[in-house]
Each structure stands twice: as C-alpha cells, then as structure tokens.
Image (cartoon, rainbow, N blue to C red):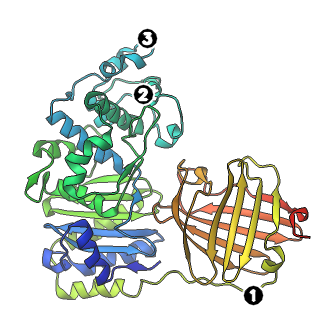
Amino acid sequence: MALISDSSATEAAVAVDGLPRARPSAVGVDGARIASFMREALEAGLELHAVMLHRHGHVAVDAAWWPYRTDTPRVMHSVAKSVTACAIGLALEEGRFALNDKVVSFFPQHLPPVVDEKLAAMTVEDLLTMRTGHAAETSGALWRGSSESWIAKFFGIPITHPPGGAYVYTSAASYMLAAILSRTTGLTLHDYLKPRLFEPLGITGEQWDIGSDGINPGGNGLTFKPVDLLKIGALHAQNGVWNGRRLLPADWVARATRAYGDGGYGYHWVVRPDGSYSALGLFVQMATVFPQAEATLVVLGAIDGSEKITPFIDHWIPDALRGGSAEGDAALDAALSPLRRPRPLNSVRANTPRLVSGVTYRMDDNRLGVRAVRLDFEKDRCVFTLVDEAGEHAITAGFRDWIAGVTDMPGRDLHHGYALHGVRVLAGAEQVNETTTRLTWIFPDTAFRDTVWCRFEGERLTLTRTVNVNSGALAWPELTGTADRSLEPQ
C-alpha cells in the first residue's frame, strides 16, 4: 500500500484541521526512528493504515497508506470509550452526579424485580474502571442491532463478584456511563460533547451511533477523523488545555490516566507501566500519549490485537522523542516518497468473462440469505451484483484503475457486526486465470478489506468471500449457484 504524505496534502490539512505542522526535528522527533518503526511493523506483516505524531503543539508526522487518509472519517471502535470518559469528567465538574453514586439509582424503571446486593453496590466509578463484578466481557457487537433496552440488558447480566474488585473489560459499562449522562443532562453523549469538546477542538463531521434507548453507545459506534483522535490525545498530553483554553479539568486528566487495581486500566484509558496511556479501539485504532514528552502517537490499522504493534512502539517511539536532525527528517521523507501509488491490478487474458457476463446465478440455499449473484463485465470494469431479501447490492470494480463508489453490500458478520450502509468503497478487479475473477473491496472509512473470489465452471459459480480482520469469522461459507439461462435475452 502506498503512502499519502505530499506537501500539497499537508497544506490542505492545515487549513482544515487547524493544527500547525513542523518538521520532526523542529519538535525533537527523530524521523529516522519513525521510519524504522513503520518499516519494521510492515515487515512483520502488520497492516498499517496511518501514523500521526503530535508534539509541542505541532503535527510532526502525518502519513496515510493508500487509499487511507488522516482527514476523512473512520470507524474508531473502542476509542469511543476514552471520549466517553471526557464527557463523564465534564459532567462531574458540572455536578451532574458523583463517582460514588449507585448505578441502580438512575434507572429504577429498568431494574429487575429483585436487585442483587452486589448490583445495588455498583458505582459510577466501577463503570469507569471496568470493575463491575461481571464475569465476562459484553462486546458491542453482541447488542448492536438489538431493539431491546440495553439498560435492561445490563441489569440482567449476572454479577459474580463484588464491584470495585476485579477488572473485566466490557462495553456494557461504557454504555451505562452514556446512559447516566443522558439521564442527568437530557442530552445524548454526542450532543453533550459537541459544544464542550468537539467544537473547541475543531472536530467536525463526527457521527455516533444510537442504541435502542436513544443513547449513544459509549463504548463504540463513534466515527471521526484520525486527526480528531490525535486532538483528543494531544488535549490530554497538554493536561486538558487547548489553545490556551481549559477544556478538561487538570485533576480529571490525572485521575483518568492512572491505573486502578491490577488491570492496567484507568477511567476508560489503557495505562502502561511506563506512564504512557492509550485510547484503544479494535483492530488498532489507537492514540498513545507520552505525557513526559508531551507527545501523542496515533496508529491506525487492521491488526488483530494491539499486543502485536506495542513492541514496535516500545522499541522505537520513546527514543524517537529524544531529539531529531535534518538527516532524520530526510530519512523519513525518503521512506514515504516511493510509497504513494495504488496497488497495481494484474490480470491474465481469458474468455470466461465474456461468456458469463450478465448471467444470473441462482444460489443454492445458504444461511446468509444470498439468492442470486451476477457479474457484468464491461470495458476495464466489472459490476458485481448480489441479491438478497433486501434487494440488489452492487459494487463496480476496475481492472485497470481502482473505482470509488458507495455501497450497502451486506456483510455484517465479517465486519464486527456493523452493517455498512452507504459506506465508501474502493474496488479493484483481477482475472486470476481462465475461470477465476478476484474482486478486492477496500472500505477506507473502516479497517475492513474484503476479497471475493468468483470461480466459473460450466454452469456453476463458486463464490468465496474473506475479510482481512474481524472479531469473528474471517470468511463466509462457500456459496454455490447455477446459471439461470431463462433470464438471458432471447
């Protein structure tokens, strides 16, 4: 994948995001070590999408691998938790509620007939530190799409040990924080933060999903730009002050970013033994703050587990913050400059596309509900159409050039439970051999990249669809279908 990091893009970004840029060496950053960090992570097989570094009020590194960008929205997954923590800190400052308030006190209408004494003892602070007494995690994907009250669902989770004790990561706790904030302010989490945090930081175009109770899920569902994530981290690196204005209480920043108990977890921030702390989303959407160096590193990717990227951060980044040079700047420039081109598309000559173009394949019964598939081959492009109970869904892919579009192609089970409605897609097509067409669908506002293999043999189509990263299955079950020649023009 290629990097987008040219000077014209940087100048445009300054105008949009309001952040001044500086050469790495001007703010004490060693560009050569940043280049080594990226190179070694890539050589280890990690899929990086973007890297940004902010220090002393300036963006020193702003790099995105093609086709990703740092100035367009992206699904941030559990980064939302750290943003939710900001709202809780502000609400506490306003006296909306207290850390030791009992969770059950806010929602009497949703309580079970008998309230367990452990549930009755759970506090707002227990939610913040993920010490709810729950035995296991509740993932955001578990409730996503459910029409039942998520508040009631929370109160139905068994509590196996006293709250305030063991750390168990769970998005259910984050949802309840958002629910408490909405209950006490009359505003959604998003609306509450808009004038208090987003607008002062110059964050625009952000979106936050709504759960069944009309509440933003505080643990996930937030979409904003990578540069916005950088701002959230930099705000904390600057102890809650932005452009001379205090946005977060200093004591809140300190309390939120220290570890409680044995979980290495603060108030919805992941805290490291060296004092750094991270807003961490699934598949590595992360901002790591190095408070002693007043620096924030943003890394976005499609990586199954932050533990895979952390060793590279630990090895290269602290030393990169000990000073830079013009030679280091040049080394980083050299590392980025050859990597700006899209991945090339390669095909072999074949007759099959001409023979199967426009043919509808009736798919055999399958649990996915896919009824039919059709490929229309045109000059230098292929239109893939899938039919299910919701209707037709299409993506146009280019054989020579990647084609940008918008789609609602189903695939929730490959995308951590997210239904990608109206999302941007960049699609490429390749004829692998006489009988097989490979389609690659990149969804640049997410971590996901799908690959679809269509193999034609006689009157039969075999379809395989995989994804680069997911919390569940990495592939659909193989689908097969038969050509319906009755639909062809006579």
Judged from the image, the secondary structure of the residue bearing numbered disc 3 is loop
Task: Tell me: 329 left or right of 46.
Answer: left
Residue 161 % position (x, y): 38, 24
Residue in view at x 13 percent, y 67 percent: 56
Residue in view at x 23 percent, y 72 percent: 14
Label whose residue precedes the other's in the sequence (2 or 3): 3
The image quadrant where one finds the C terminus is bottom right
Amino acid at pointer 1: Arg
Q: In this rendering, is residue 193 above or below 489?
A: above
Q: In this rendering, is residue 476 above or below 50?
A: above
Amino acid at pointer 3: Val
- Label 3 Cα neighbours within 10 Å, binned few <14 / some 14-19 / many ≥20: few
In the rendered image, which residue does mark 1 sit on?
Answer: 349
In the rendered image, which residue does mark 3 sit on?
Answer: 114
Q: Nearer the viewer, mark 1 or mark 3?
A: 1
Give the quarter of the image for residue 113: top left
Q: Nearer the viewer, mark 2 or mark 3?
A: 2
Residue 337 % position (x, y): 36, 87
Residue in view at x 62 percent, y 54 percent: 410
- Label 1 Cα neighbours within 10 Å, binned few <14 / some 14-19 / many ≥20: few
The answer to whether residue 267 is visible is no
